[in-house]
Image (spheres, grey):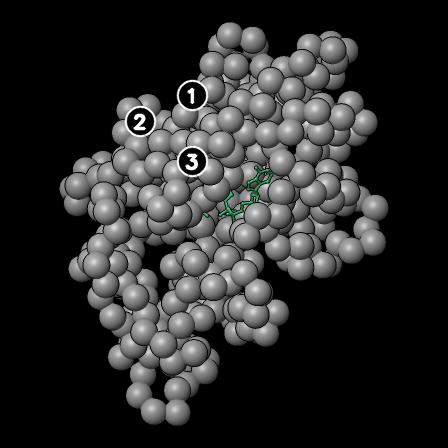
């Protein structure tokens, strides 16, 4: 069985649902249920003995130790984090607490658990840390995409806290021999994302006839990956990745924010036309985020060559699926009381 952290969040819940459906392997899901966690995302697993949900904090070392002892997982898959850059600018303390201290607590308990395993169990054990492309900083328009050896240059408190966690994970492999794996992924999109992030925010605003706020000149470029493809990559790295290695994951789909928003508007125009006008008329440029990174792009050559992974969903097909999902789930997803 697996111990998954943050499995009620956006990517974590997609991972939990697709793993139970695909591999059938049981998992313990440790999640604090912050504003970003949503148990309703896991409704399809209600009453399913393969999914054990535990509400708790990754910083609670006694709880983590107890879960490891009781469930004896073959791996820890660590998604739990504070993940929103804007929130990290307004209040960085929580980011240091969960992303740095929380990862440290998990590593310490994993180390102590690992040391007590039998040799065959040790051989199999993995600690998989989910990280982001934001640790590498920002690219100019002509710069080559980030590789696994690009020096870290985090620019936001969020990115810095993730970079710190990545360094700790690396050190636990080198110092203690903990069989760690790190994945650094680009921007994800898909079902179950909290509506503070670009795509669900725009869909929610558009459907409400409210302005679509786009930062600065809208020319910030992100590399978009459908969440299902990310989850497949995580499972592959877990099974086939080499301990101590890091793997970049991305969609090879660079889009400027304004182009993404315009595409979303066109999809909505087709799927749910407004009574008058077009959704793109709602686009409003707003004051830029401080220190806003200009461009991210991932070179995914390593995971492609060594593990044979490539994204399956194109940007167009993934976005269409995503819009469909939000339209089908407006009532439940956007009506979350915390979705202010
Ligand atoms: N969303 C993206 O585009 C993206 C891209 C690359 C990497 N990542 C990384 O993937 C991971 C998941 O991202 P997401 O977008 O699903 O985040 P999210 O904010 O949607 O979910 C985070 C989950 O972690 C839980 N959590 C927060 N603090 C916790 C704590 N102290 N103890 C236990 N649980 C806690 C929350 O309740 C929530 O369910 C993060 O590590 C993030 O840095 C995200």
Q: Residue 226: where, in percent of width, then height?
A: 47, 53
Which residue position holds label 3? 93
Q: Mark 2 or mark 3, which is nearer to you? A: 3
Q: Which mark is residue 152?
A: 2
Along the line of sight, the residue nearer the viewer: 163 or 230: 163
Q: Residue 121: where, in percent of width, then height?
A: 74, 17
- SS at circle 2: loop
Along the line of sight, the residue nearer the viewer: 177 or 22: 177
- SS at circle 3: helix
Instruction: Verify CB contact (< 8 Å) between mark 2 and mark 1.
Output: yes
Q: Residue at x 74, y 13 (%)?
A: 117
Which residue position holds label 1? 167
Total numbered labels: 3
Q: Is residue 69 above or below residue 156?
A: above
Q: Nearer the N terminus, badge 2 or badge 3?
A: 3
Please identify the quarter of the rendering in which residue 23 is found: top right
């Amino acid at each position: 069985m697996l111990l998954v952290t943050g499995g009620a969040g956006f990517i974590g819940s997609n991972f939990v649902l697709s793993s139970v459906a695909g591999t059938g392997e049981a998992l313990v899901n440790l999640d604090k249920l912050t504003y970003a966690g949503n148990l309703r995302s896991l409704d399809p697993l209600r009453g399913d003995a393969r999914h054990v949900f535990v509400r708790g904090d990754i910083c609670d070392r006694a709880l983590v130790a107890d879960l490891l002892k009781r469930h004896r997982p073959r791996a820890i898959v660590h998604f739990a984090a504070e993940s929103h850059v804007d929130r990290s600018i307004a209040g960085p303390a929580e980011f240091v607490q969960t992303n740095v201290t929380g990862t440290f607590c998990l590593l310490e308990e994993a180390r102590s658990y690992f040391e007590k395993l039998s040799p065959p169990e040790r051989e199999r054990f993995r600690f998989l840390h989910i990280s982001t492309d934001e640790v590498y900083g920002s690219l100019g328009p002509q710069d080559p995409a980030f590789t696994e050896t690009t020096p870290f240059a985090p620019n936001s408190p969020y990115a810095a806290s993730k970079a710190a966690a990545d360094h700790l994970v690396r050190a636990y492999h080198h110092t203690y021999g903990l069989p760690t794996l790190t994945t650094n992924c680009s921007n994800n999109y898909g079902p179950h994302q909290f509506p503070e992030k670009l795509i669900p925010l725009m869909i929610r605003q558009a459907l409400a006839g409210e302005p679509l706020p786009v930062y600065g000149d809208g020319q910030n470029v992100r590399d978009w990956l459908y969440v299902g493809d990310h989850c497949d990559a995580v499972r592959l790295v877990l099974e086939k990745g080499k301990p101590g290695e890091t793997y970049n994951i991305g969609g090879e789909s660079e889009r400027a924010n304004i182009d993404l928003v315009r595409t979303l508007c066109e999809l909505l125009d087709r799927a749910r036309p407004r009574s008058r006008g077009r959704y793109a008329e709602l686009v409003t440029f707003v004051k830029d985020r401080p220190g806003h990174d200009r461009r991210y792009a991932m070179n995914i050559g390593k995971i492609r060559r060594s593990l044979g992974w490539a994204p399956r969903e194109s940007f167009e097909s993934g976005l269409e699926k995503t819009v469909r999902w939000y339209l089908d789930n407006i009532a439940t997803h956007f009506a979350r009381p915390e979705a202010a």
